[in-house]
């Protein structure tokens, strides 16, 4: 079988269900891809790394430029390139796939109905391709473009990835073993600065973590809608729920069928709130991950603040109970 990425993957002797082939990626700009990798390393992410000169890329550049006291152009100008320090790390890394990297459990198909999801034990990745894309903060289509449609996802295969490998995976023992594994799988660096506040800006579409006047990190976010607006005000972080389940409660979800029953949707990267829930003092609201990272900053939410799984997990290491969370128009 030559259709590598979508060929059935044998896991424990059982063929994993095949995921749909990703849409072909548009041409990847190698310079932009490298800049996105460096921005990710510095904490100013673009959501997914895809090598495109998108609005999210320009937003990340503006955030980085602001933090480094550079002219805020939103362009990859000479001063910004120097500050990003391209010699710090190459844009890509080539790794040999292992059985562990390709291990499930996989959940495919994922039922659309929450009652059917609630019958499962986990909402895992749909395929090895989806898992690898999340691990390296990118999209399935970008991985295919960096490699080829003939690249077989099996142990021993050499694959090119965006170079987001962390400098440390020595996560605090206060986290559960399961969450430490989640952090490692998502290539979240264990060395994160501590924030004294989090600011969510509705008009700009970003979340920033600060220490004093210093911007520590900036992540693109999906937040609220006309029906479920972002709750403007000053709140506090109550705590962090790692690898959470999620309660489908039609009574508090505006677009839900009120005749539906409550359901508990199991944990997993494709859970509606992703791999982590950062609870807020505003009841029913939190900062959390997502099963659809490519939609961050492009769609609406039910009022909560949605980040990519890797950005939400990174933020979880930067905050603690009592950290202020300021939501501004």
Image (tube, grey):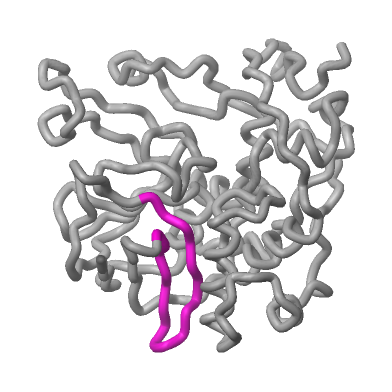
The stretch drawn in magenta includes residue 60? no
Which region of the structure is painted magenta? 205-222
Q: Is residue 153 left or right of residue 135?
A: right
255 is higher (above) or lower (below) than 276: above
Location of residue 94 in the rendering, given as x and y in whole percent from the top left corner: 86, 48
Residue 240: x and y in percent read: 34, 56
Picture coordinates of residue 280, whole percent (x, y): 23, 58
Q: Is residue 216 magenta?
A: yes
Count of labels in the image: 0
Q: Nearer the viewer, residue 126 or 181?
A: 126
**Image position of 310 (left or right of 114):** right
Q: Position of residue 125 (x, y in %)?
A: 56, 29
Q: Residue at x 68, y 51 (%)?
A: 52
Closest to the observer: 198 or 48? 48
Res. 203 in view: yes
| Image quadrant containing the C terminus | bottom left
* Residue under the image location 56 percent in, 88 percent down: 69
Q: Can you tell which quarter of the image residue 73 is in? A: bottom right
């Amino acid at each position: 079988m030559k259709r590598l990425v979508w060929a059935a993957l044998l896991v424990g002797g059982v063929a994993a269900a095949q995921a749909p082939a990703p849409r072909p990626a548009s041409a990847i700009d190698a310079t932009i891809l490298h800049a996105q990798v460096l921005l990710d390393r510095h904490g100013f992410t673009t959501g997914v790394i895809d090598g495109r000169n998108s609005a999210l890329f320009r937003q990340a550049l503006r955030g980085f430029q602001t933090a480094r006291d550079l002219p805020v152009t939103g362009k990859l100008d000479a001063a910004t390139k120097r500050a990003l320090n391209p010699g710090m790390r190459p844009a890509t890394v080539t790794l040999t796939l292992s059985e562990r990297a390709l291990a499930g459990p996989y959940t495919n198909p994922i039922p659309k109905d929450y009652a059917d999801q609630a019958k499962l034990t986990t909402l895992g990745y749909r395929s090895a391709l989806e898992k690898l894309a999340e691990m390296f903060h990118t999209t399935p289509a970008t991985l295919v473009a960096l490699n080829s449609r003939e690249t077989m996802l099996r142990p021993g295969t050499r694959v090119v990835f965006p170079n987001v490998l962390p400098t440390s995976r020595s996560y605090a023992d206060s986290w559960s073993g399961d969450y430490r594994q989640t952090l490692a799988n998502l290539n979240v660096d264990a060395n994160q600065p501590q924030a004294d506040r989090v600011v969510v800006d509705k008009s700009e579409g970003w979340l920033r973590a600060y220490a004093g006047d210093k911007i520590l990190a900036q992540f693109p976010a999906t937040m609220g809608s006309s029906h479920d607006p972002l709750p403007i005000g000053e709140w506090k972080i109550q705590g962090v729920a790692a690898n959470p389940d999620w309660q489908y409660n039609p009574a508090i979800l505006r677009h839900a069928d009120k005749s539906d029953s409550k359901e508990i949707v199991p944990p997993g990267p494709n859970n509606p709130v992703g791999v982590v829930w950062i609870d807020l003092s505003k009841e029913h609201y939190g900062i959390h991950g997502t099963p659809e990272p490519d939609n961050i900053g492009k769609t609406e939410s039910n009022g909560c603040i949605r980040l990519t799984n890797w950005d939400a997990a990174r933020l979880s290491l930067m905050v603690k109970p009592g950290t202020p969370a300021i939501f501004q128009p």
